[in-house]
Amino acid sequence: MNMDHITRQHYGVHPTIHTNGIVPKGPTLDFTTPHGREALDNIVGGYAG
């Protein structure tokens, strides 16, 4: 997954919405690290998704 490409595509194809042409730089996301969703089980009250 190339987030830089996705971000530039999203902001580049909508010039009428994103009129200033600013493309956000970050955040840098690492999709290979554990997400930690299991920790939310206690907070949400057992919602398994």
Image (spheres, helix red, strand yellow):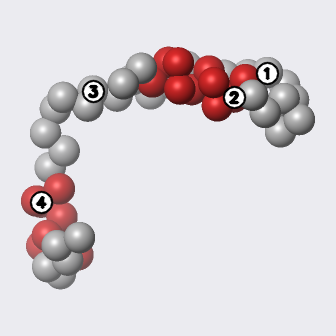
1 vs 4, front mark: 1
Write down the residue under mark 1. 21
| Residue drawn at (45%, 24%) of the image | 3
N-terminal of the pair, mark 1 or mark 4, is 1
N-terminal of the pair, mark 3 or mark 4, is 3
N-terminal of the pair, mark 2 or mark 4, is 2
Calculate the distance from the C-alpha at mark 3 to the C-alpha at mark 4. 19 Å
Write down the residue under mark 4. 39
Could you tell me which secondary element the residue under label 3 belongs to?
A: loop
Q: Amino acid at mark 1?
A: Gly
Checking the image for residue 11, the label placed there is: 2
Residue occupying the far bottom of the picture? 45
Write down the residue under mark 3. 30
Compared across the picture, whether 38 is left or right of 13 comes to left
Q: Amino acid at mark 3?
A: Asp
| Residue drawn at (57%, 26%) of the image | 7
Front one among 4 and 39: 4
Q: Residues within 10 Å of mark 2 (few under 14, many from 20)?
A: some
N-terminal of the pair, mark 2 or mark 3, is 2
Disc 2 + disc 1, Cβ < 8 Å: yes
Q: Residues within 10 Å of mark 1 (few under 14, many from 20)?
A: few
Q: Amino acid at mark 2?
A: Tyr
Could you tell me which secondary element the residue under label 4 belongs to?
A: helix
Q: Residues within 10 Å of mark 4 (few under 14, many from 20)?
A: few
Compared across the picture, whether 40 is left or right of 23 comes to left
**Residue 28 at x, y percent in the picture:** 39, 23
Calculate the distance from the C-alpha at mark 3 to the C-alpha at mark 1. 26 Å
Q: Amino acid at mark 4?
A: Ala
